[in-house]
Image (cartoon, grey):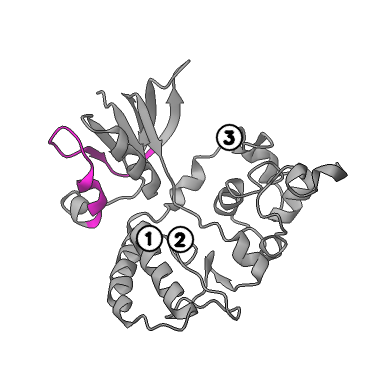
């Protein structure tokens, strides 16, 4: 079998990326969740929006990718369903396992977070006075949800009514809940990582090197995980899911300005360098 595009995983990122690449391509969707065949499209409506050659994508449930194959470029992916392994030739693999909000700025300001998201009230107010939150930091839901929340935050922060926004915002939150339900990570993913699987790309650390530590802080002190350019934004959530220890709250609260890595020349006047 050959598919120009293989979409892999439980997160919407791979699917949305593939939409741009699959204008006239045959698409293979590898989903790590198990769904009854007759319910696939009703439960996962995002897949019906994929552009293609007029036919639905080929869909495989309970499928886990175990290898990317190719020398100078990707030529195939190997995947596993139960005990059986398969291989499909492809030019592009769009892989996504969930989205994680970037809450560092909210942490610096002292805003309360819950389950990784900034806590806001009906008017987008955070737990910090005069600080409003909008967008993916309050819940993953796409650009339209972010825009209506931003409109509410802007109106209420300036003392203007936002009654006309509630219905649209509530409708977008139905999409947030659908995303959470459709792309919930399967516990079986924890069985895929081997000791030599790279977990921290910045510091070139494998799963076996950090899995022995009891928590994120200890792994960071001993093996430097999360101390590269991404500052734990990629490997932190992966460590939390795979190792089951979680990223300590104290680590999130310890975020300091500048939020993102920058050059010293941006912080110190040139005449002082």
Q: Which mark is residue 141?
A: 1
Residue 214, x across and y down, in percent = 71, 55
Q: Helix, strand or loop at disc 3? A: loop
**Residue denoted by label 2:** 136
Task: Please name the residue shown 45% across and 80% down the image.
Answer: 156
Give the mark toward the camera: 3 or 2. Answer: 2
Give the Cα distance between marks 1 and 2.
6 Å
In the rendered structure, does residue 96 fall within the stretch colored magenta? Answer: no
Judging depth in this view, the residue of 97 and 64 nearest the camera is: 97
State which quarter of the image contains the N terminus.
Answer: top left
Q: Is residue 16 left or right of residue 212?
A: left
Residue 59, x across and y down, in percent = 24, 40
Task: Please name the residue shown 36% across and 45% down the image.
Answer: 32
Judging depth in this view, the residue of 210 and 4 nearest the camera is: 4
Q: Which mark is residue 197?
A: 3
For the residues bearing labels 1 and 2, Cβ distance under 8 angstroms: yes
Which is more N-terminal, label 1 or label 3? Answer: 1
Say if 100 sits above or below 156 in the image: above
In the picture as drawn, the residue positioned furthest to the front comes out as 271
Q: Which residues are magenta?
A: 43-64
Judging depth in this view, the residue of 129 and 201 nearest the camera is: 129
Give the Cα distance between marks 3 and 2.
29 Å
Q: Is residue 272 visible?
A: yes
């Amino acid at each position: 079998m050959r598919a120009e595009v293989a979409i892999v995983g439980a997160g919407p990122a791979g699917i949305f990326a593939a939409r741009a690449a699959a204008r006239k391509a045959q698409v293979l969707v590898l989903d790590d969740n198990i769904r009854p065949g007759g319910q696939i499209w009703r439960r996962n409506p995002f897949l019906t929006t994929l552009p293609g050659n007029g036919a639905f994508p080929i869909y495989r449930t309970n499928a886990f990718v175990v290898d990317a194959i190719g020398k100078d470029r990707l030529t195939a992916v190997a995947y596993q369903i139960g005990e059986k392994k398969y291989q499909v030739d492809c030019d592009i693999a769009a892989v996504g396992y969930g989205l994680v909000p970037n809450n560092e700025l909210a942490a610096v300001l002292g805003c309360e977070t819950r389950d990784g998201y900034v806590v806001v009230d009906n008017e987008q107010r955070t737990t910090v006075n005069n600080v409003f939150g909008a967008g993916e930091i309050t819940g993953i839901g796409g650009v339209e949800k972010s825009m209506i929340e931003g409109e509410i935050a802007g109106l209420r922060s300036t003392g203007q009514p936002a009654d006309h926004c509630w219905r649209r915002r509530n409708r977008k939150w139905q999409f947030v809940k659908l995303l959470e339900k459709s792309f919930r990570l399967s516990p079986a993913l924890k069985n895929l990582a081997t000791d030599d699987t790279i977990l921290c790309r910045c510091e070139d650390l494998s799963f076996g090197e950090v899995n022995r530590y009891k928590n994120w802080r200890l792994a960071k002190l001993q093996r430097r995980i999360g101390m590269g350019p991404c500052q734990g934004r990629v490997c932190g959530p992966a460590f939390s899911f795979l190792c089951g220890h979680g990223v300590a709250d104290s680590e999130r609260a310890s975020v300091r300005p500048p939020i993102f890595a920058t050059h010293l020349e941006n912080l110190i006047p040139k005449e002082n360098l």
